[in-house]
């Protein structure tokens, strides 16, 4: 058999995938029979091999039971950092998504009804070592073949497992149904009577496999932080990921799996990966020199965060806790202190982006800027959140106890509040910080005055609305009593 195909000349085929060609069907069947007699049969899949995106791929169909047997998943966990996430093949399980898939299968496939599942995408090549067996792909082609798609047979060696790139939730729920004691044998048999379509991508780079997953997600939602972590084809995503991986503090405290910019109050992480991307994006988009590359615009960001960790008290405490596993300091306790620490939220990352850009534009030393930022009161309130009285005066009390620097960030609901993450509110907060730290440049003083006037008007309008709401609530209560 030949192994020369013109279309594969420039394709990087992993070392554990051997490509052969034949234009003789009998020779192909003879090779399959030979391997079977020698005990090397493994699994044989008929399908089509093709080139797409400079990668060799193979598409086939498998019985559901066989698909589970020849594949595997390797999940990261919720709130893992970037380093850990990039060492695993699959994202954390999303309980709601898993439940949705399971319910769908139980209500359709498991009762013999019509259903359809998207194709599974697997990989062979990632995470293999010298002891791993080789897969053989035999193509119906010849040396003069000028096409880039061929009928073929994939010989997967005994014990080999395909790495799941896309479809981990579907595979997991199928496996759980087939092994669950709560699902009847009839339901299991009904599910096993089906097959699924499968695409196998041959590449040995986990980063490339993650990129495949991100590409699959272009047509369906994936948490923004995971997109930033995996989709390094986007230059800003790559800058964000490299910044986090290259900085020990960020690597330990940036959540690579979060769906939102802000994390839950009890999370041990500080910022989400999408918040880091927001940091990078602001610098790139607002740097005055449009001729500079994005790398140049963000150059020094690692040193900037190192300076912040050295000077800001809350970051210093978390850095000590990172190094001392027995420390009682937690991110959650610091984040909730006096109504909430703005530095430990998405808005804090927005402030740091503006501070970094100020340093670059005004030639300010990172250490000097960090020491100035350390004098800012980053707490949202002058009291603890639990000290606020619940009831009709809640909104009024929140505004009364809010620090003037952050008051305009408040978004208040019934009995609760949150901190805005909008860029407009971030600009307003930064102008206030500039005035407080004497960082005014050019027309900053004028803009600060305007921003403060606008913020004051907003605050008064919010307070007036809160008082009207209180009045109407009391009036309604009086009517009910009457």
Image (tube, helix red, strand yellow):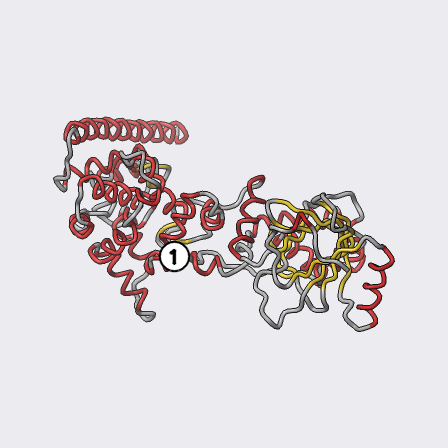
Residue at the image point whose x is 25% and y is 44% from the top: 356
Residue 275 in sight: yes
Which picture quadrant has residue 66?
Answer: bottom right
Kindly give the residue lying farthest to the front in the view shown.
144
Question: Does 466 sit left or right of 232 as displayed?
Answer: left
Q: Is residue 33 above or below residue 473?
A: below
Q: Quadrant of the N terminus?
A: bottom right
Q: Is residue 462 above or below residue 183?
A: above
Q: Position of residue 300 (x, y in %)?
A: 27, 50
Q: Nearer the viewer, residue 161 or 435?
A: 161
Q: How many neighbours does mark 1 have within 10 angstroms: few (below 14), some (14-19), or many (20 or more)?
A: some
Q: Is residue 438 above or below residue 202?
A: above
Q: Position of residue 246 (x, y in %)?
A: 35, 57
Which picture quadrant has residue 122?
Answer: bottom right
Q: Position of residue 42 (x, y in %)?
A: 76, 66
Q: Report which residue position mark 1 lands on.
A: 245
């Amino acid at each position: 058999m030949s192994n020369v195909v013109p279309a594969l000349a420039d394709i990087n085929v992993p070392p554990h995938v051997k490509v052969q060609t034949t234009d003789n069907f009998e020779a192909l069947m003879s090779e399959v029979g030979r391997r079977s007699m020698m005990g090397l049969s493994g699994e044989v899949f008929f399908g089509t091999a093709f080139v797409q995106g400079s990668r060799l791929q193979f598409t086939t169909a498998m019985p559901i039971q066989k698909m589970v047997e020849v594949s595997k998943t390797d999940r990261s966990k919720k709130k893992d950092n970037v380093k850990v996430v990039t060492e695993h093949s699959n994202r954390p399980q999303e309980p709601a998504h898993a439940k949705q898939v399971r319910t769908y299968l139980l209500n359709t496939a498991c009762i013999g009804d019509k259903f359809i599942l998207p194709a599974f995408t697997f990989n062979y090549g990632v995470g293999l070592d010298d002891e791993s067996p080789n897969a053989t792909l035999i193509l119906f082609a010849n040396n003069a073949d000028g096409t880039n798609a061929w009928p073929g047979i994939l010989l997967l060696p005994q014990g080999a497992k395909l790495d799941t790139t896309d479809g981990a939730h579907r595979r997991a729920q199928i496996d759980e149904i087939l092994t669950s004691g709560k699902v009847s044998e009839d339901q299991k048999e009904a599910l096993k009577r089906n097959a699924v379509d499968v695409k196998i991508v041959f590449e040995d780079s986990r980063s490339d496999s993650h990129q495949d997953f991100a590409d699959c997600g272009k047509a369906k939602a994936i948490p923004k932080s995971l997109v930033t972590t995996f989709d390094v084809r986007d230059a800003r995503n790559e800058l964000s990921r490299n910044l986090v991986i290259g900085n020990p503090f960020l690597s330990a405290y940036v959540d690579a799996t979060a769906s939102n910019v802000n994390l839950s109050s009890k999370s041990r992480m500080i910022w989400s990966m999408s918040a880091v991307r927001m940091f990078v994006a602001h610098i790139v988009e607002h740097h005055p020199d449009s001729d500079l590359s994005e790398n140049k615009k963000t150059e020094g960001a690692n040193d900037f965060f190192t300076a912040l960790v050295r000077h800001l008290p809350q970051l210093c405490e978390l850095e000590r806790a990172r190094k001392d596993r027995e420390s009682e300091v937690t991110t959650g306790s610091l984040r909730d202190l006096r109504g909430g620490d703005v530095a430990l939220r998405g808005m804090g990352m927005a402030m740091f982006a503006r501070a970094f850009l100020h340093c670059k534009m005004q030639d300010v030393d990172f250490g000097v800027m960090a020491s100035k930022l350390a004098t800012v009161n980053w707490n949202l309130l002058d009291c603890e959140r639990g000290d606020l009285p619940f009831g009709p005066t809640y909104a009024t009390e929140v505004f009364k106890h809010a620090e003037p620097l952050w008051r305009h960030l408040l978004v208040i609901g019934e009995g609760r509040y949150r901190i805005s993450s909008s860029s407009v509110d971030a600009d307003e907060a930064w102008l206030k910080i500039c005035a407080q730290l004497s960082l005014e440049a050019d027309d900053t003083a004028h803009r600060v005055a305007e921003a403060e006037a606008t913020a004051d008007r907003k605050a008064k309008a919010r307070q007036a609305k809160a008082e009207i709401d209180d009045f109407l609530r009391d009036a309604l209560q009086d009517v009910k009593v009457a």
